[in-house]
Image (cartoon, rainbow, N blue to C red):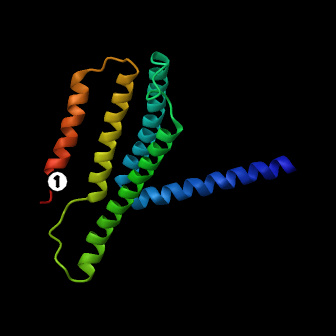
Amino acid sequence: MFKKIIMDNRIINRSVFTGILAFIGDRLGIIYPALILFVFLMILDYISGMLAANKEALEHPLNPQLGWNSKKGLIGIYKKIGYMLTISVAISMDYIIFVFIGEIGLDNKQNTLFGVLVLVWFILNELISILENVGRMGVQLPKFLVKTLTEIRKNVDEKNNLE
């Protein structure tokens, strides 16, 4: 009997969690899959950074500047939280521009989707960072891959320069 109650609670919890994710996904539209990719890449970047730091510590045991450091790890986590806050601000700006501006009778000459642009820019940063970490681990990287990612990020910056 107790086991059945636990199983019922798990099913209810999973159903509620799935429903919440479906609702959020519906509201965010195109941003949702990109946001999921971004969270995955942030985790991958953090792990690859730890692995690269450990490899450097093994190769240079007398150098205190190299290796895993909890302070550096915590700063990395703060940086990732900052990314998420910045994306939240960009998505909020989109909402304000596309919903409220029209409601109060102002002209909207801006057709940029800040949420998507900021998210793509951060995704490119994470991809470049992962490749840098992999390079620190001793893997020889295809130059065209790093160059292409860097050029795409530069194009996003240039194309959407609002000055």
For this view, does 17 lie left or right of residue 63? Answer: right
Q: Nearer the viewer, residue 90 or 29?
A: 90
- The part of the image, by quadrant, that contains residue 114 is bottom left
- In the rendered view, does 156 fall on the left or right side of 34? left
Coordinates of residue 33 in the picture (x, y in percent):
39, 47
Residue sitting at 30 percent across and 40 percent down? 124
The residue under the point 38% across, 28% down is 133
Give the residue type at disc 1: Asn
Give the residue at x 26% y 70%: 97
Q: Secondary structure at mark 1?
A: loop
Mark 1 — residue? 160
The residue lying toward the viewer, choosing from 145 and 132, is 132
Residue that extends furthest to the right in the rendered view of this protein? 1
**Nearer to me, 27 or 148:** 148
Q: Is residue 162 above or below residue 156?
A: below
Q: Residue 65: x percent and y percent?
A: 43, 29
Residue 71 on image: x %, y % = 50, 41
Relative placement, left or right, of 61 versus 17 is: left
Q: Give the answer, above or below, for where 136 lies relative to 114.
A: above
- Image quadrant occupied by the C terminus: bottom left
Taking the view exactly as shown, the residue that stands out farthest to the bottom is 104
